[in-house]
Amino acid sequence: MAFQFKNPLHYPLAVLAGGIVLVLGVRLVRLPSLLALPAAVAVAVGTAAIRPEQSNPTSQPSGKFPDLTAELDQLYYKASDLTEQAELLREEARERLQEVQQMELLGAVQYACDRTQELPDKIQSFIDRMGDGKALLSAAELTQQIADATAKRDNSSGPVQAQWQTLVDSLQRNLSLAQEGESTSQAQIANLSTLISNAAGTLQQLQNKLRTADLSNTHETSELRALSDEFSSFQENVDLLAA
């Protein structure tokens, strides 16, 4: 198969790999920068080349919703970007959390990040169903979703409970639209987009906390675990909306 150039700046893992090679080359192997830099660039380009192609989603809602193509494309790319960022965080957590007493926290962070890898496929499935006119929910389906989200809310606490309450409120607005005979397509897309944006914000908080936390302090490790749970909860929200 012919080599296909991809801009490594579009692939965070490729940038990370190049950066590691540069640091190792200069600091450990003590290569001259004139040699280390080209090697780092070569690794970044090579890593980008072997990364799976982020193909355009088949967001062709012809006929029913031709005006939603741009919104669906943006939704897919937001999901893909979140997946890339979660993969970086998973690797950072593996490097940072190495003590025996940190294994539970490491597992929680990595589980949340691993689940994010499913997100683009779930969004793509939603897009495909939207194109077929099968993603719109009936009043009965929305009522069931509200019941499911309410149960999750009642079994949660803190920021996670607030997330579920926000989702309940959104679903109730969608139910009102459905009962009035209006399309819920735009609202469904907006809800998913908001959830993914909020998840990205929580992931950034988790990453910042992981880099600065005193891991010998139980209060700070508890905050890390809470952020990890919050990040996982966003994905549960997406699962419910995109199912």
Image (spheres, helix red, strand yellow):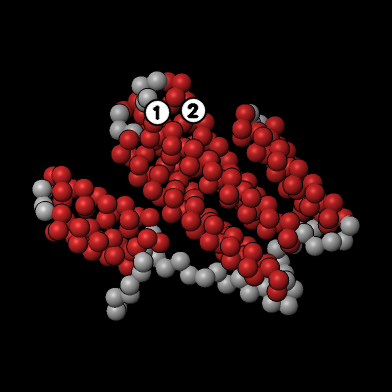
- Residue 213, numbered circle: 1
Q: Is residue 206 left or right of residue 101?
A: right
Residue 204, image x, y percentages: 48, 42
Mark 2–mark 1 CB contact (< 8 Å): yes
Vertical arrangement, residue 181 with respect to residue 30, above or below: below
Say which residue appears at 47% left-offset and 53% top-offset. Answer: 83
Element type at mark 1: loop
Vertical arrangement, residue 9 with respect to residue 210, above or below: below
Residue 41: image quadrant is: bottom left
Say which residue appears at 33% left-offset and 72% top-offset. Answer: 5
Say which residue appears at 70% left-offset and 41% top-offset. Answer: 166
Q: Residue furthest right?
A: 180
Residue 118, image x, y percentages: 50, 55
Say which residue label 2 marks: 223
Residues 224 and 237: in front is 224
Under mark 1, the amino acid is Ala
Residues 14 and 158: in front is 14
The tag earlier along the polypeptide, 2 or 1, is 1
Residue 225, image x, y percentages: 48, 31
Element type at mark 2: helix
Residue 120, image x, y percentages: 52, 59
Say which residue appears at 63% left-offset and 28% top-offset. Answer: 157
Under mark 2, the amino acid is Glu
Quick one: quadrant of the N terminus? bottom left
